[in-house]
Each structure stands twice: as structure tokens, then as C-alpha cells.
Image (tube, rainbow, N blue to C red):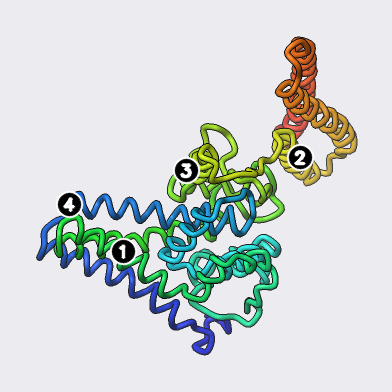
């Protein structure tokens, strides 16, 4: 490595932890299997419970709640995230969120703590294993989090809380389940192995989600959407959407998107432990997709010295009309919810008329892209 990887820059605590925990997990699994037999139901249940408790504490708690303030949560859930987030061994909420806010503010630049522009392994885990002066943290960007007594308590006691919740708790639960043999198995599976799985699931969002996937909403940075990453990371894989609409409590905004973190938030909203869920309006999402598609078509035509002025004028007119029409439909639906019973039919007719207008505008936009694509194909 270069100057960044010099011995004086290595964070020996983090590096040792990231290397030794997987090593001890493998040794522990083999030894447990040889001397105490294969894992049973106790190990399986504790592994799954700890995996979800620690993983969701990162994706829902550290990320969507604390870093982005995408919703509000009651103090019991804040305490839950603080305890099991510590057990995920990714540092305190305050430090994690400060790094993450810097990542969004300076994505792909040298000031990005885990910039994907510096390579897969750097953004995956290398940045955790070295210390750089440029990324030294004064926590000035997380003053809102410092106001929480729970989060200040967690920050002061992060290693003790992490050890108790991440390693001691699964072993204790295993002992209560089936004695010493199950306690050892749960320590290995629910503690060591689970830590490795949660670590690298989170790390993949910093690395793979900035390298592989699609960019339907914006190509202003390296973030990408990937169903497979979403499946592996509690819904965090819809990363291009997230970077484009950071305040949204959802990463997978469509109902069929695999996003367990979104489902978790909604479930606790139903029992009034979550509130103020922030959602990006549909018209903003659709316009972002249209703008990104047009930008790519325009760039391809420009490479062949094709004048796109007329296309741009038509696109802007149609785009603005689409946005207005979709906004009016959204507003009419909101009006419908609060309207008196005798006025609902009038609003329904209004919505129906606007939907007809929307279909016409969508056809116009598709015609623009079709003409642009014909130009692109003819030049190939």
C-alpha cells in the first residue's frame, strides 16, 4: 500500500479484531463440531435472533434512524439499538453516524471515510484498519445525537456493552437453553460467527453497492441498486435510491422490494413505537428516473455530435407537465382522505381526468426517448 497503509497508520485494535474474530469463529466451529457435536436448535435460534437484533440495530438504528433521521423512535427502541448495535462491533452510534454523514456529504472524494474510488478492499474494510488524519472525528456533525443520554452512555461504554450483548448474552442464553455444551455453541455461532456475518453484510454496502448494480435515480455518484445486496443486507442494497433520497425511511420504495428494515419500521409504527416516517413523493422519484434516462441518451447523442437542443426543449416541457400532473394527483388523493363524503365523487372524477392526462404525457415522454434511441442505433 501507499502512505495510507504505512505502519504508523495501522489501527491495531480494529485490525486485530477484524482478523482474529473470523479466525476464532472458524476454529470454534470446527472444535465444537468435533468435541460437542453438530449445532442444534439452540445454536440455530440464538444465531438467527442475534443476527437480526444486531443487524437491524445497524440498518434501522445506526443508519436510517440516527444517521439520517428518517423517522422517530421511542426510547425503548433507541435503547435496543444502542445495546445490540454495540454487539455488532461497529463502534458507537455517535462515531458511526458521524462517519456516515461525512460519507454522504463527500461521496467518492478523499474526504469520504470509505470512498469506493480508492478500491473495493479499502471501502470494504481497509478504512477501518487504518487511521488517517483527514478522517479524524470531532463529532461536530452529530450534535443532535450527543443530546441523547442513551447514546452518550453507549459511546462512553461501547466496549463493555458490546462484549456483554455480543458475546456474553448469546452464551448465557445458550446455557439457559441446554447447559454448558449449548452455551459454547451459542458463543461460537451467536457471538463469533454472527459478528463476522453482520460485519461483512454492512461492509458490502460500503464497497459492492458502489461498484455493481444499476443507477436508475442518479449517476452523480457511484452508488448502485442491487436486489441481491438488498436480500443479504436487510434491504440496504437499494443504495442508489438511498443516496438520491437520503431522508426516506425506505431503501426499497416499492411494495415488492425486499427491505426488512422498512418492514421493521412499519411494524413498530403500528404499535406507536415509531412515528414521523419520511417518504419521498412518488413524483420526485419518477422525475429523478426520467432525468437520469434523458441525461444518458443526451450524452450518447452528443458523442456523435448530434444537436440535442430540440430534444432537450421537448423533454423539459414534458417533464414539467408530468411533475405537475403527478403532484396534483398526489394532492387530490390527500384531499380525498380528508374530504366530506358528499365531495368525494367530485375529487374522484378529478383524479380520473388527471390520470388520463398523465397517460398522454407518459406516451409523449416515451416518444421522445424512442426517437433519441433510434438516433443512437442508427449511429452504431
Per the image, the residue denoted by label 3 is: 260
- Whichever of labels 4 and 1 marks the residue nearer the N terminus, that label is 4
Q: Residue furthest bottom?
A: 8
Element type at mark 4: loop
Q: Nearer the viewer, mark 2 or mark 3?
A: 3
Q: Nearer the viewer, mark 4 or mark 2?
A: 4
The x and y percentages for residue 21 are 33, 71
Give the number of the disc on residue 291. Answer: 2
- Whichever of labels 4 and 2 marks the residue nearer the N terminus, that label is 4
Residue 328 sits above or below residue 69 on the image: above
Whether tag 1 and tag 2 are in contact, CB under 8 A, the answer is no
Structural distance between the alpha carbons of marks 4 and 1: 18 Å
- Whichever of labels 2 and 3 marks the residue nearer the N terminus, that label is 3
Structural distance between the alpha carbons of marks 4 and 2: 53 Å
Q: Residue visible at 49% across and 70% down?
A: 91
The x and y percentages for residue 98 are 62, 68
The x and y percentages for residue 164 are 35, 69
User: Left of 333 or right of it: where is 258?
Assistant: left
- Whichever of labels 3 and 1 marks the residue nearer the N terminus, that label is 1
Q: Residues within 10 Å of mark 2 (few under 14, many from 20)?
A: some
Residue 32 sits above or below residue 138 on the image: above
How many marks can you see? 4
Q: Residues within 10 Å of mark 3 (few under 14, many from 20)?
A: many
Q: Residue visible at 74% across and 13% down?
A: 344
Q: Is residue 371 visible?
A: no
Per the image, the residue denoted by label 1 is: 169
Amino acid at each position: 500500500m501507499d502512505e495510507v497503509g504505512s505502519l504508523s497508520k495501522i489501527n491495531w485494535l480494529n485490525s486485530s479484531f477484524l482478523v482474529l474474530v473470523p479466525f476464532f469463529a472458524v476454529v470454534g466451529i470446527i472444535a465444537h463440531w468435533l468435541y460437542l457435536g453438530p449445532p442444534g436448535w439452540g445454536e440455530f435460534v440464538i444465531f438467527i435472533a442475534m443476527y437480526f437484533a444486531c443487524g437491524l440495530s445497524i440498518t434501522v438504528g445506526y443508519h436510517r434512524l440516527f444517521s439520517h433521521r428518517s423517522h422517530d423512535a421511542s426510547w425503548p427502541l433507541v435503547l435496543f439499538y444502542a445495546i445490540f448495535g454495540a454487539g455488532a462491533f461497529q463502534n458507537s452510534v455517535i462515531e458511526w453516524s458521524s462517519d456516515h454523514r461525512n460519507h454522504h456529504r463527500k461521496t467518492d472524494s478523499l474526504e469520504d471515510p470509505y470512498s469506493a474510488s480508492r478500491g473495493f478492499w479499502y471501502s470494504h474494510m481497509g478504512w477501518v484498519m487504518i487511521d488517517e488524519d483527514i478522517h479524524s472525528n470531532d463529532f461536530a456533525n452529530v450534535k443532535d445525537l450527543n443530546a441523547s443520554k442513551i447514546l452518550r452512555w453507549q459511546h462512553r461504554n461501547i466496549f463493555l456493552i458490546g462484549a456483554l450483548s455480543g458475546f456474553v448474552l448469546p452464551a448465557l442464553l445458550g446455557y439457559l437453553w441446554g447447559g454448558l455444551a449449548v452455551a459454547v455453541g451459542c458463543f461460537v455461532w451467536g457471538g463469533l460467527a454472527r459478528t463476522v456475518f453482520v460485519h461483512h453484510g454492512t461492509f458490502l454496502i460500503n464497497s459492492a453497492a458502489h461498484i455493481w448494480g444499476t443507477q436508475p435515480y442518479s449517476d452523480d455518484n457511484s452508488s448502485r441498486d442491487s436486489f441481491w445486496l438488498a436480500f443479504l443486507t436487510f434491504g440496504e442494497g437499494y443504495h442508489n435510491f438511498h443516496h438520491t433520497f437520503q431522508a426516506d425511511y425506505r431503501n426499497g420504495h416499492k411494495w415488492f422490494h425486499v427491505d426488512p428494515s422498512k418492514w421493521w419500521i412499519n411494524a413498530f409504527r403500528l404499535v406507536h413505537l415509531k412515528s414521523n416516517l419520511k417518504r419521498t413523493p412518488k413524483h420526485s422519484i419518477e422525475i429523478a428516473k426520467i432525468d437520469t434516462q434523458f441525461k444518458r441518451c443526451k450524452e450518447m447523442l452528443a458523442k456523435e455530435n448530434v444537436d440535442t437542443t430540440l430534444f432537450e426543449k421537448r423533454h423539459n416541457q414534458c417533464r414539467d407537465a408530468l411533475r405537475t400532473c403527478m403532484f396534483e394527483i398526489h394532492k387530490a388523493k390527500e384531499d380525498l382522505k380528508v374530504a366530506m363524503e358528499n365531495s368525494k365523487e367530485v375529487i374522484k372524477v378529478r383524479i380520473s381526468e388527471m390520470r388520463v392526462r398523465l397517460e398522454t404525457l407518459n406516451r409523449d415522454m416515451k416518444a421522445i426517448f424512442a426517437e433519441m434511441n433510434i438516433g443512437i442505433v442508427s449511429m452504431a
